[in-house]
Amino acid sequence: MPNKRKVHRPTSVSIVGPGNLGTALALVLPSAGWKVKFIAVRSAAARKRKENTELARRVGAQLVRLGVEPLDTDVVWIAVPDDVILQVAQQLADRQSWRGRIVFHSSGALTSEQLAPLRKQGARVASVHPGMTFVRSSVPRMAGVAFAIEGDAAATRLAREIVERLDGKSYSINKRSKVLYHVFGSFASPLVIALMASLERVGLAAGIAPGKIKTMMVPLLWQTLRNYLKHDAASAFSGPLERGDVTTVRKHLAGLKAVPEAREVYVALARAAVKNLPVKNRLQLQRALATAGSLRRSQGRLPTRASRPARPRRPRYQG
């Protein structure tokens, strides 16, 4: 009988960039059977940071300086800010052999083309973006998390296998759609937090003690989210806009002059609601919001020609 060739299954991974996402990857990948061998940082200062040394110790990895030591693992997963992914890819491409290796990056907005320098050296590349929020104080579970994946066939195939082992969900994303896909995620998390920040500012302006803002708002926030998840945006929509209460909306706009940034947020969201959700007195609401927008523009616009100081006329050449 012919000898069966033993197929190598990739099991080792290097994480480039132990930020919020890189830290989360280093902590969850071992549960999927992946050994984190290297954690690479881009500066000597980062190598000395306590949180990075503790992370490396916790997962049994070696903390190395990017470009100094080769990352001889089956997979290299780049988790650095978007604006330096291409630079990191070029730095890696110049340092070692990449034929047959797999490289991922996790940008939501950028495509796998950012890894072109590594592809030219023989690597198979993909963008693998988890649709999840990552902060230092909490490492979320990946079960049920949607991973948007695009890139070379071999790399995307392995990415889907990893996601499956993490109990996540894999979705193919078109390169042309990545920016709007990332905006979609931004509306679901960071912009929600921006909205919460505006809510807090308005609460303080209303005289609510800082320690009571969450206590007062959490039941309302939770029920709003439950209504949306159980039904849809239209069915979960309520309040003065839905009722067509133009008088109350005008009072809101007047009161919010005390918190101008929150007023701009209110106007933008209210306009979107009037356009996309079921409301009464739609035309009157549009007029009230248009007036608010005109006032905002008039306060911030450049002086008109009539209000600008006259420029001194240049004397004509009399030569």
Image (tube, rainbow, N blue to C red):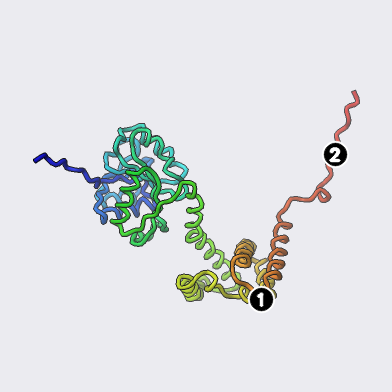
Which mark, by number, is residue 286?
A: none
Residue found farthest to the right: 318
Residue 47 in view here: no
Tag 1 secondary structure: loop
Instruction: Specify the amino acid type for callout 1.
Output: Asp
Disc 2 marks a residue whose amino acid type is: Pro
**Residue 245's disc number:** 1
Q: Given this view, does label 2 or label 1 mark the residue nearer the observer?
A: 1
**Residue 106: x %, y % from top left:** 40, 48
Q: Quick one: quadrant of the N terminus?
A: top left
Using residue 179 as the reference point, say whether residue 202 is left or right of it: right
Residue at image coords 61%, 64%: 272
Residue at 52% from the left image edge and 65% from the top image edge: 196
Quarter holding residue 139: bottom left
Q: Position of residue 174 (x, y in %)?
A: 45, 48
Q: Nearer the viewer, residue 249 or 98?
A: 98
Classify mark 2: residues with Cα within 10 Å, few (<14), some (14-19) or many (20+). Answer: few
Residue displayed at 34% across by 36% down: 67
Q: Residue at x 88, y 32 (%)?
A: 315
Can you say whether 108 is above or below 95 in the image?
Answer: below
Marks 2/1 in contact by CB < 8 Å: the verdict is no
Q: Specify the quadrant of the image occupied by residue 132.
A: bottom left
Q: Which residue is mark 2?
A: 312
Q: Is residue 282 above or below residue 133?
A: below
Q: CA distance from mark 2 to mark 1?
A: 52 Å
Q: Could you say where residue 246 lies in the image, as x and y percent from the top left?
A: 68, 74
